[in-house]
Image: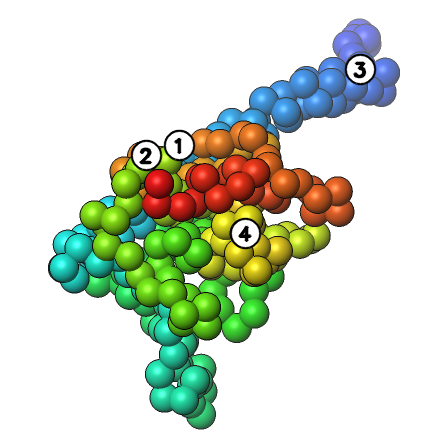
């Protein structure tokens, strides 16, 4: 004669599953800020490393051109070719984009990209970095020329490159402007790394800056490195 056996409960009950799900959601909510912070810290480090390599390329360019800094930009072929420190854009039957004046000293264009920045740009690759055009690289439209490294009397206090952007939402630009520059409105620093901007100074240092000067209420996260031209000029 067969005897029946009471089947034990296998698996979880609905209540137990809900408890486990709630606990998992609480843990995820607790861990998410830490994971986000860790990811952003990684991006900030990669961005700083890219800026440092751009700075090295900038110094190498000067070394090969009689101590003269790379021009910010100039045009050829009646404006059909735009040559700049980062990229050269040729507009013929098609648009051809190649590495710019620092290209021979940079192995890949990926170095010129901040991993955090994905803002819109006009007809140029979006990098998130900009070069001190007002004082270092010069601007043909303003009648200014690139300076020699020996003209920079305070390299530790003169920005060469920085995280950059302007507007809201933040858009890309590749020419960093000092506050006195008429084009400062479109040549600002972007403090994108949790309130920090990566900055590469003319003396070869790359470091973060958290103080936003000349902020505008409707452009959160962008501004200047100084309230005057002191972080940009040669003195």
Quarter of the image with the N terminus is: top right
Of tags 4 and 2, which is closer to the observer?
A: 4
Residue at 43% across, 84% down: 79
Which disc number belongs to residue 19?
Answer: 3
Q: Is residue 228 visible?
A: yes
Mark 3 or 4, closer to the camera: 4
How far, Cα to Cα, is label 1 from label 3?
A: 46 Å
Query: Whole-percent x and y of residue 213?
Result: 59, 37
Tag 4, which secondary structure? loop
Is residue 193 visible in this depiction of the protein?
Answer: no
- Quadrant location of residue 19? top right
Q: Earlier in the sequence, mark 2 or mark 1?
A: 2
Q: CA distance from mark 2 to mark 1?
A: 11 Å
Q: Residues within 10 Å of mark 4 (few under 14, many from 20)?
A: few
Locate residue 174 relative to residue 67 in the image: left or right.
Answer: right
Residue that label 1 marks: 207
Q: Nearer the viewer, residue 124 or 62?
A: 62
Local secondary structure at mark 3: helix
Report, in whole angstroms, how far the alpha carbon at label 4 lies from the one at label 2: 20 Å
Q: Which mark is residue 156?
A: 2
Mark drawn on residue 88: none
Frontmost of labels 2 and 3 is 2
Give SS at disc 2. Answer: helix
Precedes in sequence: disc 2 or disc 3? 3
Q: Residues within 10 Å of mark 2 (few under 14, many from 20)?
A: some
- Check disc 1: other Cα within 10 Å, few if <14, some if 14-19, many if 20+: some
Q: Which residue is mark 4?
A: 180
Mark 1 or mark 3, whichever is nearer to me: 1
Residue 147 coordinates in the image, percent (x, y): 28, 57
């Amino acid at each position: 004669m067969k005897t029946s056996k009471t089947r034990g409960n296998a698996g979880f009950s609905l209540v137990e599953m809900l408890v486990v799900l709630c606990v998992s959601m609480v843990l995820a909510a607790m861990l998410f800020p830490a994971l986000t912070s860790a990811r952003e810290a990684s991006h900030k480090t990669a961005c700083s490393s890219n800026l440092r390599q751009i700075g090295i390329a900038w110094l190498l360019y000067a070394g090969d051109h009689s101590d003269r800094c790379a021009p910010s930009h100039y045009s050829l072929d009646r404006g059909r070719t735009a040559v700049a420190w980062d990229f050269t854009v040729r507009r013929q039957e098609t648009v051809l984009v190649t590495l710019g004046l620092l290209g021979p000293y940079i192995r890949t264009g990926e170095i010129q990209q901040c991993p955090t920045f994905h803002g819109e740009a006009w007809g140029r690759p979006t990098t998130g970095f900009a070069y001190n055009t007002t004082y270092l690289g010069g601007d043909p439209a303003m009648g200014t020329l690139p300076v020699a490294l020996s003209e920079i009397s305070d390299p530790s206090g003169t920005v060469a490159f920085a995280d950059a952007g302007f507007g809201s939402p933040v858009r890309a630009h590749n020419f960093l402007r000092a506050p006195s520059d008429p084009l400062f409105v479109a040549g600002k620093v972007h403090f994108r790394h949790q309130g920090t901007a990566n900055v590469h100074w003319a003396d070869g240092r790359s470091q973060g800056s958290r103080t936003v000067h000349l902020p505008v209420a409707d452009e959160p996260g962008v501004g200047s490195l100084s309230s005057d031209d002191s972080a940009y000029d040669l003195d």
